[in-house]
Image (cartoon, rainbow, N blue to C red):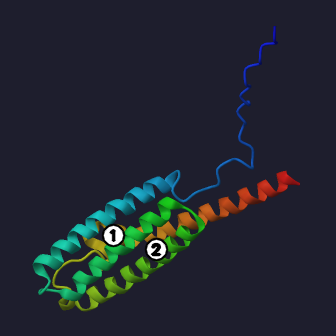
């Protein structure tokens, strides 16, 4: 008679240590809320700009094209924040910076020359039509990116210390 073959052993599940713990990510925790708000704003701005461009383009072409640009920037920011990898976060940082500059520039322009903005857009009057969310959101987004970058650097430092 032959000896019975032992059943294959499954390795014990590893407890996550610093090497296997998930790094801080822009799309986790509060970042999920931020991604959801950006996604919602991207949908709203896209819908509004499509309607404005297809139905009322002759009334205010430049402001309506700026709304379409805002929608595109919101989409890029949403994807970049949700993905959270290094390249995506860089892209999101650029998108949020362009958004902030755009809101400030278009907001100031629409206040100084209201005739140039006969119809409301996403960024006109500093995003008043959207409850000033377009003005506040890039600041919150840039803060979150900076916060997760610091936490990620601290996590990397902890992994390096534990490897020594």
Task: Tell me if 155 is positioned left or right of 36 in this view.
Answer: right
- The image position of residue 58, as x and y in percent, is 12, 87
Looking at the picture, tell me which residue is in the foreground, 96 or 4. 4
Q: Residue at x 62, y 55 (%)?
A: 24
Q: Residues within 10 Å of mark 1 (few under 14, many from 20)?
A: some
- The image position of residue 106, as x and y in percent, is 32, 85
Looking at the picture, tell me which residue is in the foreground, 27 or 116. 27
Task: Tell me if 96 is positioned left or right of 20 in this view.
Answer: left
Q: Residues within 10 Å of mark 2 (few under 14, many from 20)?
A: many
Of the numbered discs 2 and 1, the one sitting upstream in the chain is: 2
Split into 4 quadrants, where in the image is the C terminus? bottom right
- The image position of residue 111, as x and y in percent, is 27, 86
- The quadrant where residue 77 appears: bottom left
* Residue wearing tag 1: 132
* Residue wearing tag 2: 96
- The image position of residue 18, as x and y in percent, is 75, 48
Q: Note whether residue 124 is visible.
A: no
Q: Note whether residue 103 is visible.
A: yes
Q: Secondary structure at mark 2?
A: helix
Image position of 23 with respect to 75: above or below? above
Q: Secondary structure at mark 1?
A: loop
């Amino acid at each position: 008679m032959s000896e019975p073959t032992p059943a294959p052993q499954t390795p014990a599940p590893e407890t996550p240590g610093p090497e296997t713990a998930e790094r801080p990510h822009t799309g986790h925790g509060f970042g999920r809320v931020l991604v959801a708000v950006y996604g919602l704003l991207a949908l709203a701005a896209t819908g509004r700009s499509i309607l404005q461009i297809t139905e009322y383009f002759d009334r205010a072409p430049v402001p309506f094209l700026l709304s379409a640009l805002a929608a595109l920037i919101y989409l890029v920011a949403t994807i970049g924040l949700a993905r959270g990898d290094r390249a995506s976060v860089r892209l999101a940082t650029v998108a949020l910076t362009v958004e902030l500059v755009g809101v400030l520039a278009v907001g100031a322009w629409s206040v100084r020359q209201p005739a140039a903005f006969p119809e409301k857009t996403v960024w006109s009057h500093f995003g008043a039509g959207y409850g000033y969310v377009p003005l506040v959101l890039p600041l919150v987004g840039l803060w979150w990116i900076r916060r997760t970058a610091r936490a990620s650097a601290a996590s990397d430092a902890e992994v390096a210390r534990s490897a020594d």
